[in-house]
Image: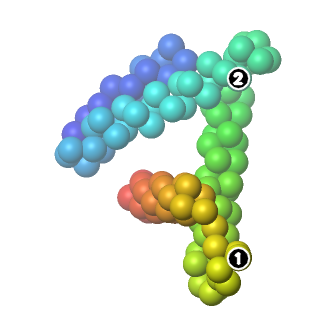
Amino acid sequence: MAQVTIRINGYAYTVGCEDGQESHLEQMAEDIEERISSIKAIGGQSGEARLLMLASLLLADELHDTRRALDQAQTAAQLPATPAEKPDPEKRAKLRRLAARAEEIAADLAEA
C-alpha cells in the first residue's frame, strides 16, 4: 500500500492508497483544495471542520447532480425516440461523458 502526503488548507495529511493510485489521490486532494479556496474567497476564513464540511457538501452536490444526469441519460436511452425527438450529437456526447464520469466517481467511492 502506498502512502501519499497531501495538503489541504495548509495542513499536511498522510493517506494510504492502493499502489498506482497516488496521482488520483493527489488530484482528489487538489479538487478539495480548490473548493476550500473558493469557499474562503466567498465567506472568509472559517474553522477547519466547517471548511471541510462545506467542501464535502459541494462535492456531494456535484455527485448528486451527476447521478441525476446519469439516471436521466439512462432513461432517455431506454426510450425509443422518434426522428423529431432525437437529441443532437453534441448532447448525446455530453451525456455519455457525464455517465462515464459518474461511473468513475461511483467506482472511486466503492473503493474508498
* Amino acid type at image mark 2: Ile
Kindly report which numbered mark, 2 or 1, lies closer to the viewer in this rendering: 1
Image coordinates for residue 12, horizontal then vertical, percent: 42, 20
Q: Position of residue 80 (x, y in %)?
A: 63, 87
Residue nearest the viewer, comparing 86 with 43: 86
Q: Amino acid at mark 1?
A: Ala
Task: Report how many numbered discs are placed on residues in the image.
Answer: 2
In the picture of the structure, the residue carrying the numbered disc 1 is: 84
First in sequence, mark 2 or 1: give its number.
2
Determine the image quadrant of residue 23.
top left
Q: Residue at x 69, y 42 (%)?
A: 57
The residue tagged with tag 2: helix, strand or loop? Answer: helix
Q: In this rendering, would 11 be left or right of 80?
A: left
Is residue 98 placed above or below 37 in the rendered structure?
below
- Residue positioned 62% across, 24% down in the render: 36
Residue sitting at x 45%, y 37%: 28
Task: Report whether residue 93 is seen.
Answer: yes
Q: Quadrant of the N terminus?
A: top left
Q: Secondary structure at mark 1?
A: helix
Residues at badges 2 and 1 in contact (C-beta under 8 Å)? no
* Residue positioned most to the front: 84
Q: To which residue does mark 2 refer?
A: 39
